[in-house]
Amino acid sequence: MTAKLIDGKAVAASIRVQLAAEVAAFREATQVVPKLAAVLVGDDPASQVYVRNKEQACVKAGLASDVHRLPATTTQGELLELVHRLNSDSAVHGILVQLPLPAHIHETTVLDAVHPLKDVDCFHPENVGLMVQGRPRYLPCTPHGVQVLLQQSGTNVDGAHVVVLGRSEIVGKPVAMMLVQKGQTANATVTICHSRTRNLSDITRTADILIAAIGQAGFVTADMVKPGAVVIDVGINRQQDRLVGDVAFETVREVASAITPVPGGVGPMTIAMLLKNTLTAAKLAANQN
Ligand code: GUN
């Protein structure tokens, strides 16, 4: 069996078309242009690409986008000052601080400084707490992208065993929390595995849905996958001069029933969800949600 490809690029494109219409309607009703402010510190090449892609996607959807590019030598105090300025700027609705930050900056201190109403990444503890309690203000972009791909691919999540590889704050933990919730494309039985998990393959082989988010190229091999499982690859790793996922795609696709490619799987969904959150932020500011 060769797995069906889950085309994140196509799903994201259709979401963006729908979103552009919603943005146009909001602009018409309020005369407000929703604006995302992205903050990029340093010159990490991958981050530069991500931020440029986010900026272009904003413009295409009818959103405004400012990118604040700061040198790698920026102090934590200077960065916090910028975040505070963006917090109090009523023309800015969403704030995104691109990660990773340089090592001398304490990431949590900066992320916690973003006003929760402008936290379109859903990284602020208030927003994470609301999400975990099942009353989200925002949904985190990549986990929400994964959930929508599962829904759009017709994968039955209700009662399924989902195994998440990775316990990061950005993907592993929140995607597990979202899929275990009561609700649509949720109600799963979720296992989170990480670097200290014993007998990893024994666990992954029981997964109906396997979500890989560990950042190691080709980590998930065919022998770790139950025949017929749905495999979602969140990894984006640079190998020589191409991007590869956390899943050994060519061999795993012969075992799985459906699989996301890298690139063109989860990545484009993250951006689509960021645009959606930026519109939500503008609606919250205008009390139009
Ligand atoms: N770096 C890698 N992924 C992300 C993300 O989703 N948001 C931000 N702000 N930085 C990232």
Image: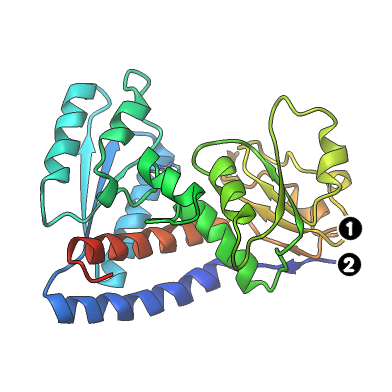
Viewer-nearest of labels 1 and 2? 1
What is the three-letter code of the residue carrying label 1? Answer: Pro
From the top left corner, tell me how far across and down residue 196 is, in percent. Answer: 72, 24
36 lies above or below 16? above
Q: Is residue 238 left or right of residue 86?
A: right
Which residue in the protein does label 1 denote?
227
Image quadrant holding the C terminus, namely bottom left
**Can you see residue 100?**
yes
Q: Nearer the viewer, residue 168 or 131?
A: 131
155 lies above or below 71? below
Which residue in the protein does label 2 denote?
1
> Badges 1 and 2: C-beta atoms under 8 Å apart?
yes
Which residue is depicted at the point 57% across and 41% down?
Answer: 173
For numbered disc 1, what is the local secondary structure?
loop
From the top left corner, tell me how far across and down residue 79 is, in percent. Answer: 21, 30
Separation of marks 1 and 2 at Cα, in angstroms: 9 Å
Q: Residue furthest top?
A: 104
161 lies above or below 64? above
Q: How is the image coloured?
A: rainbow
Image quadrant holding the N terminus, namely bottom right
Q: Nearer the viewer, residue 4 or 275?
A: 275
The picture quadrant where one finds residue 10 is bottom right
Queried on whether the Cβ of the residue with tag 1 lies below 8 angstroms from ligand 1, the answer reads no
Q: Nearer the viewer, residue 66 or 176?
A: 176
Which residue is depicted at the point 64% across and 65% down?
Answer: 150
From the top left corner, tell me how far across and down residue 266 is, in percent. Answer: 56, 57
Q: Residues within 10 Å of mark 1 (few under 14, many from 20)?
A: many
What is the three-letter code of the residue carrying label 2? Answer: Met
The disc at residue 267 is none
